[in-house]
Image (tube, rainbow, N blue to C red):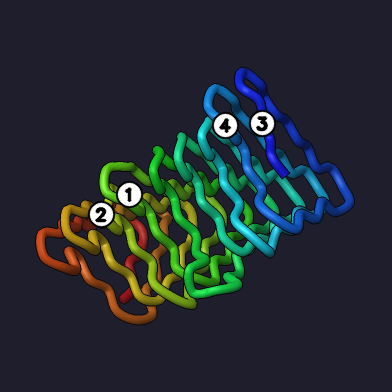
Amino acid sequence: FRLGELGGSSGLCTINGGVLLSSSVVSMGEILNSSGTMTILAGQLIATNDLTKVGNLGPGIMNINGGSASLAYLSIADNAAGTLNLNNGLLTVTPQSASDWTRVGNLGRGQFNINGGTALLKGEFHIGDNLGPTGIVAMVGGQLFSTNDLTAIGRYGFGQMTVSNATAIATNVSVGRHTSAIGVLDLRANGSFFAIDDVSIGRFTNAVGYVFVNGGLLSL
């Protein structure tokens, strides 16, 4: 299921009830010079067999304003810029294999804005996945659960996570994980971040990590 499949095109999909079931790849901004936007107001998106790309070769946007999205592998900014806005409703990512995860900023600049609702990420969560790209997670409301595996804020690239007026719960956390990675965790007013297992800041050689507590709660 591809939005923006021809050069110069703009693909739009709005789900306002019912179920959109995709048995293969879902892509927003499929090719160069195209764009794609998906908005969920109510109902369900189910794409649990393959990769969901928000920004493939063209820019992509996904808005979850209600209803739910159930995915297996989520890549925000797979190659081009991508933005996911979770404003309400439920986002669930359940891996079908060990190589399925959620990443923000693979080869493009990725932005994951959580303004409300709930994100359940049941596999690894990478922010700034590869060398060069930037991944940003900005929480100003809602809840994020990433409790089954690694959360890397700056895995190989630059990753930043800001939490205010929201709650994030993670298990094994690295802020700046691999060589040349830079990670930033920034807690602000009424933001809560709970790490229920290991936390490392600058995990491996030449990785850099910063944690700022400017308000809220950091629980280790």
Task: Give the quadrant of the C terminus.
Answer: bottom left
Question: Would residue 136 be seen by someone viewing this image from the given angle?
Answer: no
Mark-to-mark CA distance, 4 and 2: 30 Å
> Nearest the camera: 69 or 47?
47
| Label 4 vs label 1, nearer the camera | 4
How many angstroms separate mark 2 from mark 3 (CA)?
Answer: 34 Å
Neighbours of disc 1 within 10 Å: few (<14), some (14-19), many (20+) = many
Q: Earlier in the sequence, mark 4 or mark 1?
A: 4
Q: Residue at x 68, y 35 (%)?
A: 3
Residue behind mark 1? 160
Are the residues flagged by discs 3 and 4 in contact, CB closer than 8 Å?
Answer: yes
Q: Residues within 10 Å of mark 3 (few under 14, many from 20)?
A: many
Residue at the spot of label 2: 183
Give the amino acid at mark 3. Answer: Glu
The quarter of the picture where residue 8 lies is top right
Q: CA distance from mark 2 to mark 1?
A: 6 Å
- Label 4, label 1: how many angstroms apart (C-alpha)? 27 Å
Q: What residue is shown at x 26% (from left), y 57% (from top)?
A: 213
x then y, percent, for residue 103 = 45, 55
Q: Secondary structure at mark 1?
A: strand
Residue holding disc 3: 5
- The reply to whether dot 2 and dot 1 touch (C-beta < 8 Å) is yes
Identify residue type, mark 2. Answer: Gly
Identify the secondary structure beneath mark 2. strand
Task: Tell me the tag on residue 31.
Answer: 4
